[in-house]
Image (tube, helix red, strand yellow):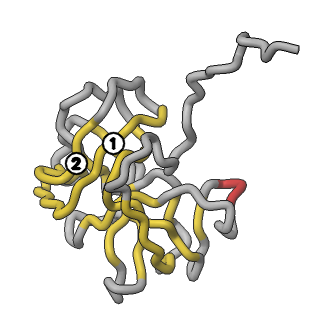
Amino acid sequence: MAIPKENYYLNKALGFGRIAEHNPLTNIRSFAAEGSDCEFGKALKFGTDNEKQVYNFNAATGVFAGVAGYSIDASDIDNSKFSAGDSVPLIDQGVVTVYAEEAITKGGSVRIRFDATGPGNFRTSADAGKTVEITEGAEWREDAASGTAVKLFLSPPFTTSAD
């Protein structure tokens, strides 16, 4: 019996925090969630102990650490969140799918929202006092509509600048 070709090769959309491309440079490290606000596919920064903890990117200050990866070990997996103390896969190198709150254009600026509207969301346009730009170490790998998963390439060290 021959293998049916229909639906054999599918271009499935990946969920937030998934590794989007096989790359030997992909780097994933484990950290503890400092708070209960780390979400899959959102920007994280180092926590109080930057060798052990991360939390959602929620202020213009702090060091961008990478993106929260998908994990079936998250305590609040139904809401795509890690609870305080959970082991968080931090993706800081390679191509990962992230949450884009606005339409993305390949090669455009990479910014992170840090205000209460959507801490850790990614976007391209500046929102003064509410976003930071990753000026070095990140670039969009595809065009995407708002509210969808989009491929982001990360390569540390990262440099950020407040808008």
* Image height of 54 relative to 79, above or below: below
| Upstream in sequence: badge 2 or badge 1 | 2
For label 2, the SS is strand
Residue flagged by tag 1: what amino acid is it?
A: Leu
The residue drawn where x is 22% and y is 48% is 138
Q: Are marks 2 and 1 in contact (CB under 8 Å)?
A: yes
Residue 59 location, x and y as percent?
28, 65
The residue drawn where x is 17% and y is 64% is 157
Using a 10 Å C-alpha cutoff, classify the residue at mark 1 as few (fewer than 14 neighbours), some (14 to 19) or many (20 or more).
many
Residue beneath label 1, please? 152
* Image height of 81 relative to 153, above or below: below
Q: Within the image, what quadrant is residue 5 found in?
A: top right
Looking at the image, which residue sits at the far bottom? 49
Residue beneath label 2, please? 138
The residue drawn where x is 25% and y is 27% is 106
Count of numbered marks: 2
- Would residue 76 appear left or right of 65 to someone viewing this image? right
Q: Quadrant of the N terminus?
A: top right
- Would residue 66 appear left or right of 31 to someone viewing this image? left
